[in-house]
């Protein structure tokens, strides 16, 4: 089983929105995120700056944990062979941050279960939970789209809206 980090078990978007509102006091338009990137929800004059912030060392180290993910994944880890996979190479400073974040918040995962790559087309398995349809497109197993503002208009994959739903699918509830 393949599980994505960002917007599935960690919340970089929520972290960025909180920071942006506290720094600039400007609204973020969730509707504009529907076009494929949550960065597009920020005012146009700040989108480059928001993207650059994602490149900063430390940004990915202190992200909030998605509600329910820790408990459900701990139980799923007993039942399934799980690999936490992230196309982290896009944000090179995130590599160390993501490993440290995972070890802190999900200590039941071994370092052998963490795969940080550039493209998920190389990943194979029975199931994949991801928030980006592009990562599911070439996956050979069962595909689950974890709901996020940037993917709400996509309809071709089975959706998981939260970790309670994931528990129902993979554990028969909790």
Image: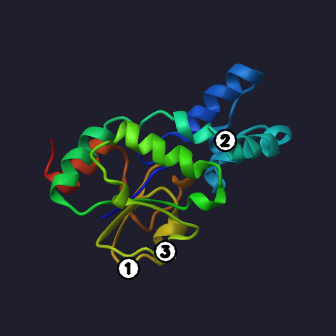
Of the two numbered discs 2 and 3 in the rendering, the one whose residue sits closer to the viewer: 2
- Dividing the picture into quadrants, the one containing residue 4 is bottom left
Q: Distance of mark 1 from mark 3, alpha carbons?
A: 9 Å
Q: Give the image location of residue 45, x and y in percent.
A: 86, 39
Please give the name of the residue rendered at 78% of the width and 43% of the height, measured from the top-left corner: 47
| Residue designated by label 2 | 57
Q: Distance of mark 2 from mark 3, alpha carbons?
A: 30 Å
Total marks shown come to 3
Asked if the residue at tag 3 contacts the one at tag 2, i.e. Cβ–Cβ closer than 8 Å, the answer is: no
Please give the name of the residue rendered at 51% of the width and 65% of the height, measured from the top-left corner: 133
Q: Which mark is residue 137?
A: 3
Q: Quadrant of the C terminus?
A: top left
Task: Pick whichever of labels 2 and 3 is earlier in the sequence.
Answer: 2
| Residue designated by label 1 | 140
Query: Please, what secondary structure does the residue beneath circle 1 have?
Result: loop
Q: Quadrant of the N terminus?
A: bottom left
Please give the name of the residue rendered at 77% of the width and 23% of the height, measured from the top-left corner: 24
> Is residue 166 shown left or right of residue 15?
left
Density class for disc 1 (Cα within 10 Å; few <14, some 14-19, many ≥20) is some
Residue 7 seen anywhere in this rendered image of the structure: no
Density class for disc 2 (Cα within 10 Å; few <14, some 14-19, many ≥20) is some
Query: Please, what secondary structure does the residue beneath circle 3 have?
Result: loop
């Amino acid at each position: 089983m393949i599980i994505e980090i960002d917007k599935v078990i960690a919340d970089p978007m929520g972290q960025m929105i909180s920071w942006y509102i506290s720094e600039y006091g400007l609204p973020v338009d969730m509707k504009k995120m529907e076009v494929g990137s949550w960065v597009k929800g920020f005012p146009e004059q700040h989108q480059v700056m928001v993207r650059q912030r994602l490149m900063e060392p430390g940004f990915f180290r202190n992200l909030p944990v998605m509600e329910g993910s820790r408990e459900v994944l701990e139980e799923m880890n007993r039942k399934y062979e799980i690999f936490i996979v992230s196309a982290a190479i896009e944000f090179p400073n995130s590599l160390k941050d993501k490993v440290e974040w995972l070890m802190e918040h999900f200590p039941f995962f071994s370092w052998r279960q963490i795969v940080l790559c550039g493209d998920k087309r190389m990943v194979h398995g029975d199931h994949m939970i991801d928030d980006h349809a592009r990562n599911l497109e070439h996956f050979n197993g069962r595909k689950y789209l974890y709901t996020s503002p940037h993917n709400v208009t996509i309809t071709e994959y089975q959706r998981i809206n939260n970790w309670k739903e994931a528990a129902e699918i993979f554990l028969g509830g909790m």
